Image: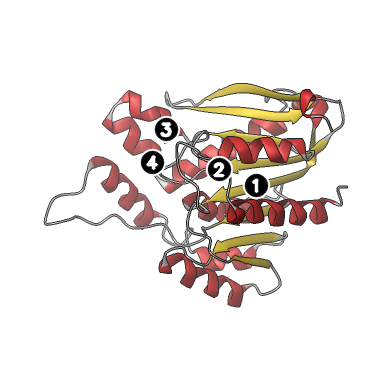
């Protein structure tokens, strides 16, 4: 597929509470229905952070209908402290995944009618979005495959530092975690998956994620686990993006190979 045919089209999804999602579709426009990959960024990232535009382009060039989007908390920062707090919970992140998938399945994303095969839908999450990708896939049968990059641990619980009170955003996140503690049992939800899952984990990432990765392997040993030697949390990349790395290239290739196998796509 020639790179000259690659299209990148923006979209926006408005929610009923004043929040919204900004996103982009990348695909080779040739009227062939393609496997879908929806990618979610980490808690401190955004859809244009670091490696995401490059990775999205690569998947599109390899024949995927690729969707990236900003979780609602990104644009909520402009709407004030209360809006950002409301948009920063795990519950809201799961709703954001759902809003994008629903828009796709209803044909409201650019070029989806001609270029997207809705029966072959995969999601990819990095960092915290790796965890919410697991939770979302466990609850939504329309997702046929899930890939997790340096994620899958239970959400971090905010804690006050030096006796200072939690911020409004931190308190909202904590309240949500307490309210939905059973739903957010990551290991149990991962074990419930009835679809193929790939967990890509850099071996130089933080111990919390490495420990959870070992636990997930025990819970569901039939799933696919890849250790990236020398890979840190961002696979050696930075923002602004300074170019790819060997560990990022390996994460991409392993993920593309996995998805092609799942979807029998050549």
Residue on which disc 1 sits: 123
The residue carrying mark 3 is 74
Label 1 – label 2 distance at C-alpha: 8 Å
- Are dots 3 and 1 in contact, CB under 8 Å? no
Q: Which residue is mark 4?
A: 88
* Real-space Cα separation, disc 2 to disc 3, in angstroms: 12 Å
Neighbour class for label 2 at 10 Å: few (<14), some, many (≥20)?
many
Q: Nearer the viewer, mark 4 or mark 1?
A: 1
Badge 3: residue crowd in 10 Å (few <14, some 14–19, many ≥20): many
CA–CA distance in space, label 3 to label 1: 20 Å
The answer to which quarter of the image holds residue 27 is top right
Comes first in the chain, label 4 or label 1: 4
Pointer 1 and pointer 2: residues touching (CB < 8 Å)? yes
Q: Is residue 66 left or right of residue 31?
A: left
Give the percent coordinates (x, y) of residue 108.
Answer: 68, 24
Residue displayed at 33% across by 24% down: 79
**Which of the two residues, 100 or 153, is positioned nearer the viewer here?**
153
The numbered mark, 3 or 1, whose residue comes first in the sequence reads 3
Q: Quick one: label 1 or label 2, which is nearer the N terminus?
A: 2
Mark in the foreground, 4 or 3: 3
Q: Position of residue 253 (x, y in %)?
A: 71, 53
Q: CA distance from mark 4 to mark 3?
A: 9 Å
Between disc 4 and disc 2, the foreground one is 2
Residue 66, image quadrant: top right
Tag 4 near tag 3, CB within 8 Å: no
Distance from label 4 to label 1 (Cα)? 20 Å
Label 3: state its secondary structure: helix
The local secondary structure at tag 2 comes to: strand
Is residue 42 rendered to the left or right of residue 192?
left
Residue at image coords 86%, 26%: 31
Instruction: Kindly identify which residue carries mark 2.
Output: 40
Q: CA distance from mark 4 to mark 2?
A: 14 Å
């Amino acid at each position: 597929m020639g790179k000259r045919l690659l299209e990148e089209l923006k979209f926006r999804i408005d929610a009923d509470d004043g929040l919204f999602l900004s996103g982009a579709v990348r695909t080779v426009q040739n009227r062939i229905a393609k496997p879908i990959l929806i990618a979610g960024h980490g808690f401190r990232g955004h859809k244009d952070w670091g490696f995401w535009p490059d990775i999205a382009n690569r998947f599109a060039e390899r024949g995927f209908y690729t969707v990236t989007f900003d979780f609602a908390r990104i644009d909520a920062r402009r709407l004030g402290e209360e809006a950002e707090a409301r948009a920063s919970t795990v519950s809201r992140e799961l709703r954001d995944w759902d809003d994008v998938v629903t828009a796709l399945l209803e044909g409201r994303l650019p070029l989806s009618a001609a270029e997207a095969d809705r029966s072959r839908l995969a999601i990819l999450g990095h960092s915290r979005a790796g965890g919410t990708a697991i939770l979302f896939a466990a609850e939504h049968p329309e997702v046929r495959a899930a890939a997790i990059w340096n994620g899958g641990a239970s959400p971090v619980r905010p804690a006050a530092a030096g006796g200072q009170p939690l911020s409004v955003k931190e308190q909202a996140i904590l309240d949500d975690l307490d309210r939905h503690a059973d739903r957010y049992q990551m290991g149990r939800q991962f074990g419930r998956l009835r679809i193929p899952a790939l967990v890509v984990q850099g071996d130089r990432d933080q111990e919390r994620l490495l420990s959870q990765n070992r636990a997930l392997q025990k819970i569901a040993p039939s799933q696919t686990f890849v250790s990236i030697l020398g890979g840190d949390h961002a696979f050696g990349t930075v923002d602004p993006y300074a170019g790819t790395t060997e560990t990022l290239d390996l994460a991409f290739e392993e993920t593309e190979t996995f998805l092609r196998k799942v979807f029998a796509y050549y």
